[in-house]
C-alpha cells in the first residue's frame, strides 16, 4: 500500500485564542497528497495513512488525530506522528484539516454557535470523512477513535459528546472540553494528557477554560467509575509523570490521566514507562470498542 510522502515545512505554532465567528470562512487547502471532499459547500481536506498490513477482507480500526489552532494536517502529521504505531498495530490513521477564518485554521467542537470559533460544521465534516473512507476501506465501525492536541483535543471531546455513535474512545493531549455537552449514547473511555505548566490551557483552569480535574470528574461521573484512582509515577525522564486510573466503570471502561509535572502546552515527547505519546494513546483506546472493554 502506497504511503503518503510529505515535504518538510516549519510547524505552525498553535494557540487557543477564540476567533470571531462572523469572519469569512474559507477552505484550508495547504496539504500535499490530501484527500478532498466537499461538506456544507466548503472544500475540506484530510490526510490518510494506511498500513502495509491492511487487508481489505478484515475490518480495520481507525484513528482520527486533530491538529491544534492555526495548524495544518501535514505539519501536524510530523509533529504528532503516529504512523509507526499505525504500521505496527495495523490501524488506519487520519489527520483532518480544519477550515480557516482570516487564515487561521481551527476546529468547532460544538453544534453551531456556542463556544465555536466559526460557522464551519466540523462535527458533520468528520462524519463525512468517516463515510468517505468507509466507502474505500473496510473500517471497523465499532473501533473508530479520536485524539487531538490543544484545539484538536477539544474536537476529540466534541465528538465524544455529539457523535458518540461513531466514536469508541477518546484521548486528549493538552486540550480541554468546552461547555457544550451532548447526549452520549454509550460509556466513553477517556484518556487525558496534560502538563502542569501549560500556559495556553492552564492545568487548573481560568475564567475562560475549565480545569483538568473538573473534566476528569465529569467523565468519572458519566461512566460511573471508581472515584479513588490507582496511581503511579515515572521519574525516569526529564520530568516526573504521574498516572491516575479511574476504573470499574460501566461496560468496564476507565478514565485515565497522565499528569506531566512541569509539562508545557505540547504534544509530549516524554515517554511514560518507555511508551511514546502515540503508543500510550493507542494502548489505551485499543482496549475498547463502542460497546466497552473488548
Image (tube, rainbow, N blue to C red):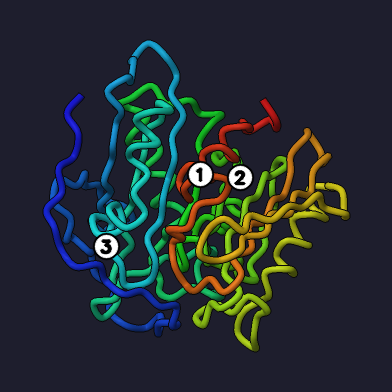
Nearer the observer: mark 3 or 1; the answer is 1
Which secondary structure lies at badge 1?
loop
- Which quadrant of the figure has residue 208? bottom right
Which secondary structure lies at badge 3?
loop
The residue indicated by pointer 1 is: 275
- Which quadrant of the figure has residue 51? top left
Provide residue 103's location: percent of width, then percent of height: 23, 77
From the viewer's side, name the closer residue of 121 and 205: 205
Q: Considering only order in the chain, which callout, 1 or 3, is on the residue closer to the N terminus?
A: 3
From the viewer's side, name the closer residue of 50 and 117: 50
Provide residue 228's location: percent of width, then percent of height: 88, 54
From the viewer's side, name the closer residue of 178 and 174: 174
The residue indicated by pointer 2 is: 164
Determine contact: label 2, label 3, CB under 8 Å. Answer: no
Q: Considering only order in the chain, which callout, 3 or 2, is on the residue closer to the N terminus?
A: 3
Q: Residue at left 40%, top 36%?
A: 85
Looking at the image, residue 191 sits to the left or right of residue 117; the answer is right
The residue indicated by pointer 3 is: 72
Amino acid at each position: 500500500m502506497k504511503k503518503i510522502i510529505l515535504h518538510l515545512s516549519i510547524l505552525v505554532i498553535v494557540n487557543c485564542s477564540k476567533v470571531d465567528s462572523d469572519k469569512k470562512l474559507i477552505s484550508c487547502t495547504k496539504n500535499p497528497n490530501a484527500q478532498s471532499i466537499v461538506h456544507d459547500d466548503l472544500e475540506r481536506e484530510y490526510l490518510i495513512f494506511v498500513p502495509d498490513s491492511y487487508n481489505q477482507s478484515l475490518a480495520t480500526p481507525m484513528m482520527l488525530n486533530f491538529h491544534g489552532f492555526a495548524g495544518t494536517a501535514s505539519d501536524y502529521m510530523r509533529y504528532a506522528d503516529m504512523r509507526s504505531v499505525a504500521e505496527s498495530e495495523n490501524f488506519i490513521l487520519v489527520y483532518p484539516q480544519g477550515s480557516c477564518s482570516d487564515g487561521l485554521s481551527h476546529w468547532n467542537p460544538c453544534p453551531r454557535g456556542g463556544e465555536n470559533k466559526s460557522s464551519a460544521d466540523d462535527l458533520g465534516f468528520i462524519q463525512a470523512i468517516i463515510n468517505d473512507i468507509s466507502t474505500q476501506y473496510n473500517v471497523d465501525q465499532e473501533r473508530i477513535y479520536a485524539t487531538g492536541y490543544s484545539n484538536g483535543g477539544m474536537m476529540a471531546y466534541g465528538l465524544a459528546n455529539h457523535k458518540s455513535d461513531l466514536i469508541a474512545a477518546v484521548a486528549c493531549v493538552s486540550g480541554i472540553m468546552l461547555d457544550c455537552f451532548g447526549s452520549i449514547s454509550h460509556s466513553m473511555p477517556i484518556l487525558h494528557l496534560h502538563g502542569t505548566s501549560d500556559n495556553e490551557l492552564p492545568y487548573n483552569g481560568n475564567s475562560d477554560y475549565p480545569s483538568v480535574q473538573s473534566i476528569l470528574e465529569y467523565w468519572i461521573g458519566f461512566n460511573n467509575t471508581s472515584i479513588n484512582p490507582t496511581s503511579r509515577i515515572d521519574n525516569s525522564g526529564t520530568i516526573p509523570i504521574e498516572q491516575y486510573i479511574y476504573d470499574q466503570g460501566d461496560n468496564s471502561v476507565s478514565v485515565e490521566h497522565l499528569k506531566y509535572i512541569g509539562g508545557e502546552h505540547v504534544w509530549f515527547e516524554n515517554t511514560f514507562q518507555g511508551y511514546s505519546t502515540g503508543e500510550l494513546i493507542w494502548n489505551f483506546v485499543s482496549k475498547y470498542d463502542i460497546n466497552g472493554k473488548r
